[in-house]
Amino acid sequence: MIQSPYQKYQQLSAQTATPIQLVLMLYDGAIRFTKLGIEGINERNFEKANQNICKSEAILHELLASLNFDYPISKQLASLYEYMLHRLIESNVKKITKPAEEVLDHLEEMKKSWRQVAGVSRRDAAQ
């Protein structure tokens, strides 16, 4: 399969990223696809809404599957990811934006938190 230079760059970025960078990339994707899903609902383009909400759901499933339950916070993250999945499904089935907008808010807040964790990790590695 022929890949564009951008696709090759994305693949290399994912292969060389740290675990925290990978999580941030997943959040970026989930945020982007959730926004596109909301846009699809608002445009009454339900195919666009469905495709993008399903992509966001797939990313949440990946985040859920990657949790390490040796850490207590993983249970809380799992509950939150499952809740967000439920809300995305509700938004997709009912073709209403409010549940997806709620998920978007959660994703953006969680991304900020992970960014802070990444900053702390970089400082620790530098010391």
Image: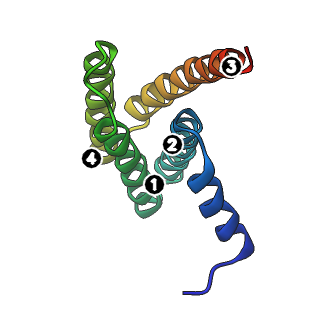
Q: Specify whether 58 is left or right of 38.
A: left
The residue at 40%/49% (across/down) is: 53
Q: Which mark is residue 26?
A: 2
What residue is disc 1 on? 52
| Amino acid at the residue labelled 4 | Val
Q: What element carries label 2?
A: helix
What residue is disc 3 on? 119
Q: In which quadrant will I find the C terminus?
A: top right
Look at discs 1 and 4 and give the one toward the viewer: 1
Q: Residue 93 carries which label?
A: 4
Name which of mark 1 and mark 2 comes first in the sequence.
2
Look at discs 2 and 3 and give the one toward the viewer: 3
The residue at 57%/45% (across/down) is: 32
Q: Specify whether 12 is left or right of 84.
A: right
Look at discs 4 and 3 and give the one toward the viewer: 3
The alpha-carbon separation of the residues under discs 1 and 2 comes to 14 Å
The alpha-carbon separation of the residues under discs 2 and 3 comes to 17 Å
Q: In which quadrant will I find the N terminus?
A: bottom right
The alpha-carbon separation of the residues under discs 1 and 3 comes to 30 Å
Around disc 2, counting alpha carbons within 10 Å, would you say few (fewer than 14), some (14 to 19), or many (20 or more)? some
Q: Is residue 121 above or below residue 97?
A: above
Name which of mark 4 and mark 3 comes first in the sequence.
4
